[in-house]
Image (cartoon, rainbow, N blue to C red):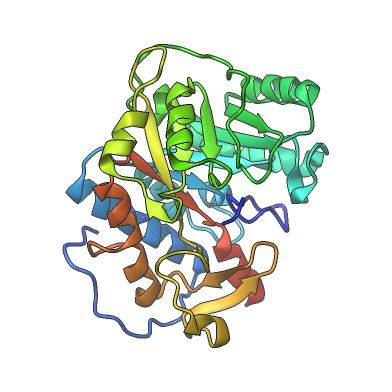
Amino acid sequence: MDGKIGLLLRRLAIGVGLLTSFPALGVAAEPVAYDTAMVDLLGSLHDYVQARRPGFGLLANGGAALYLPHDGNTPQNASKMLQILDGQLVESVFYGSDLKDGEATKKETSDYYKLALQVPLQAGLPVFNIDYVLDAEQQAAAQQKNSQCGYISWASTHRKLDYIPQEPPAGVNDRDVRALRDVRNFLVLLNPGQYARETYFAKLEQSPYDLLILDLYCEDRPLTAAEVQRLQHKPQGGRRLVYAYMSVGEAETYRAYWRPEWQAKRPDWMAEENEDWGSHRVKYWRPEWQAILYGSPSAYLDTIMQAGFDGAFLDVIDVYQYFRDRR
């Protein structure tokens, strides 16, 4: 999403049945509850990947309010979230909310994050946080605050998530990392455009992170299984995880699935443009969109699995709040 990991908060609320075949396309009714529709989608993704690649991980970004049975969200949804996800990522718990890099997040917003994130933490799910800071001093402060809360953190000075830091992360280790709960540090690199493809892989190979969260594409070509395998080994020794980005809540105009005619007339399963990023919110409960996400060899999630990634990083989960608020 050209630098975006997810929709940032507009309010205090924070921001997958075994499928053996995909349902016939058609117009799905507007859901009674948008939060339940999102949890159902995540549940379907979970069941789909586990039937095909057991152990393939799902890391969610946003939607942490779904762990709390309030504001219309049900206890069943909150419980299901703990069963279908392998980890939860959020942004700007301490710095950089509302696109204001380096500015401390408002206390009431930060406190709400902490409240919601206690649920997955207590259930044994790892919690990751990205703060957006301006300098090394804020990076150190963010690291301390996150550590006190039990979060695995990264304080980035590049909101576009387009660079590989020169300085090593905290907690560099040579242990094998085969699950998100074993991760001690991570890197998110979603816009590799400044790197030539071979330079990109060479630099990532030499980075010491336990978890790499990358875009599926580099130079308009998806990563291959051989390239992903290159990245699954830390230079200091030990296995690491490599996850691929996938938006479940917005359609991105630069993706292979995008059709030029949608720019002039969007299909009825596509909602308004997110002007912050130039992508389009989607009616995520609709089978037309879900067929783009998964269920065929050319679908986005299937392509990620075919490339040998260890998991998928699911973004824009909190789009359900947009539809709920609009109603």
Dividing the image into 4 quarters, which one contains the N terminus?
A: bottom right
Point 65% across, 20% down: residue: 148
Seen in the image, is 287 located left or right of residue 122? Answer: left
**In the image, 115: left or right of 176?**
right
Q: In the picture, residue 38 is in which quadrant?
A: bottom left
Single out the residue that lies furthest toward the left.
20
x and y percent of residue 313 in the render? 44, 46
Q: Residue at x 69, y 19 (%)?
A: 144
Whole-percent x and y of residue 101? 78, 41
128, 124: nearer the viewer? 128
Q: Which residue is rendered at x = 35% and y = 59% of the image?
A: 300
Q: Nearer the viewer, residue 165 or 73?
A: 165
Quadrant containing the C terminus is bottom right
User: Is residue 124 at least partly visible in the picture?
Assistant: no
Give x and y (percent) for residue 43: 34, 55
Tell me which residue sits at (49%, 23%) in the image. 207
Indicate the quadrant where residue 103 lies: top right
Query: In the shown orientation, is residue 55 left or right of residue 40?
Result: left
Residue at far bottom of view: 265
